[in-house]
Amino acid sequence: MCVVNALRALTFQSLCQLDLRSNIIADRVQDLAAVLLACPRISVLNLEHNSLGDDGMLNLSGALPHCSALTTLLLGDNSVGKSGIALLAAALPRVPNLATLGLGGNCIEDEGCRSIAAVLTGCSALTRLNLRRNNLSALGATSLAAALSSVKTLQNLTLSRNLLQAAGVAALSRCLPTCEALTALDLASTAIGDDGARVLRSASINRSLLPEY
């Protein structure tokens, strides 16, 4: 029996955490959405490594606004592209308690990053955002930087393994003085070079923020 079908057969009024990592459920996301509607208290949802793709985001994004208790959403390594992330992004402001959003290892590219950046002002509880390895360039970093100053709660930002280069870091560095809550910034393997490192260190001086590069 499919794991999602098994879940649908049960009642989970008290379920708070659901971990379905690596379960090959890409063609059952519609059923999963129905499960989520029956789990009003769910706060942690981990769907990493399921190849959900853009079609999966279509079904999932419709269910998310009903998950008012959701604080952690992990969608890493799911082959989500820019159209799928646009669907997800539109739903995020309607998830009022979302604090952790994991999107690492997808392929949202710069356009998808713009979709996320456009809704960050509506994600008032967000503290952790992971965009690791998403084919982002300096353009994506620039879009994100323009929105970061309005996210007063963000504490941890992961952009590792994206080709941001010095130009992307320069854009991020301009918003750092206004990101008062940010304490962790992961820029590992982003090709920022010596120039980018100097710009970043200058922007983060007198801050507890520890740049990684």
Image (spheres, rainbow, N blue to C red):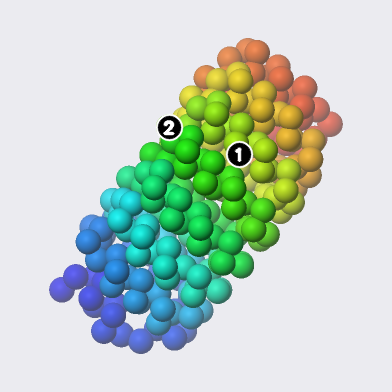
Q: Is residue 74 visible?
A: no
Q: Nearer the viewer, residue 138 or 194?
A: 138
Say left or right for 27 vs 171: left
Q: Nearer the viewer, residue 69 or 111?
A: 111
Q: Quadrant of the C terminus?
A: top right
Q: Position of residue 49 (x, y in %)?
A: 32, 51
Badge 2 is on which residue? 135
Q: Residue furthest left?
A: 1
Q: Position of residue 99 (x, y in %)?
A: 60, 59
Say left or right for 185 vs 82: right
Q: Position of residue 140 (x, y in %)?
A: 54, 33
Category of crowding for the residue at label 2, using alpha-carbon neighbours closer than 10 angstroms: few (below 14), some (14–19), many (at least 20) = some
Q: Position of residue 53 (x, y in %)?
A: 31, 51
Q: Is residue 144 above or below residue 51?
A: above
Indicate the quadrant where residue 30 lies. Answer: bottom left
Residue at 68%, 59% (x, y): give it: 124
